[in-house]
């Protein structure tokens, strides 16, 4: 299912939590390149394979892991 996971700006910001923030721009957590806007880093992630990077795969995997972690913290669903 990870092939169908889409990366959003919210996912990029969630991935950046706890990371040093560049003064000007946003850092791709996968390749450490800095971009001037969130749109630019999102575009980079979407087209990273054309540039020889695997940033899209990194963010997809990270999104799946963060969703699993969130579900585990919520606990099992209440019985009905």
Image (cartoon, rainbow, N blue to C red):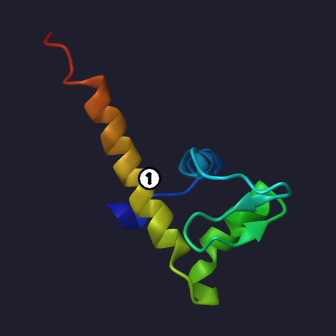
The residue lying toward the viewer, choosing from 23 and 48, is 23
The residue lying toward the viewer, choosing from 69 and 18, is 18
Q: Is residue 53 above or below residue 20?
A: below
The residue lying toward the viewer, choosing from 65 and 8, is 65
Q: Residue at x 38, y 43 (%)?
A: 67
| Quadrant assignment for the C terminus | top left
User: From this viewpoint, which residue is outermost toward the front?
Assistant: 20
| Quadrant assignment for the N terminus | bottom left
User: From this viewpoint, which residue is outermost toward the top?
Assistant: 80
Structural crowding at the residue carrying mark 1, measured as other residues with C-alpha within 10 Å and reported as few (<14), some (14–19) or many (≥20)? many
Q: Label 1 belongs to which residue?
A: 63
The residue lying toward the viewer, choosing from 13 and 5, is 13
In the rendering, at what x and y percent does residue 71 appear? 31, 33
Q: Residue at x 64, y 88 (%)?
A: 51
Q: Secondary structure at mark 1?
A: helix
For residue 61, side relative to residue 12 (left or right): left
User: From this viewpoint, which residue is outermost toward the left?
Assistant: 79
For residue 56, side relative to residue 72 (left or right): right
Q: Residue at x 32, y 40 (%)?
A: 69
For residue 80, side relative to residue 50 (left or right): left
Q: Residue at x 74, y 58 (%)?
A: 26
For residue 73, side relative to residue 53 (left or right): left
Kindly indicate the quadrant of the structure image that contains residue 32.
Answer: bottom right
In the rendering, at what x and y percent does residue 22 appear? 77, 57
Kindly indicate the quadrant of the structure image that contains residue 35.
Answer: bottom right
In the rendering, at what x and y percent does residue 73 appear? 30, 28
In the rendering, at what x and y percent does residue 52 appear? 58, 90
Q: Is residue 62 above or below residue 34?
A: above
């Amino acid at each position: 299912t990870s092939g169908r996971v889409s990366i959003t700006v919210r996912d990029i910001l969630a991935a950046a939590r706890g990371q040093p923030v560049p003064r000007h721009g946003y850092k791709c957590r996968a390749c450490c390149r800095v971009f001037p806007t969130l749109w630019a880093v999102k575009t980079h992630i979407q087209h990273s394979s054309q540039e020889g990077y695997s940033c899209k795969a990194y963010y997809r995997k990270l999104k799946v892991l963060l969703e699993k972690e969130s579900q585990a913290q919520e606990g099992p669903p209440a019985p009905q």
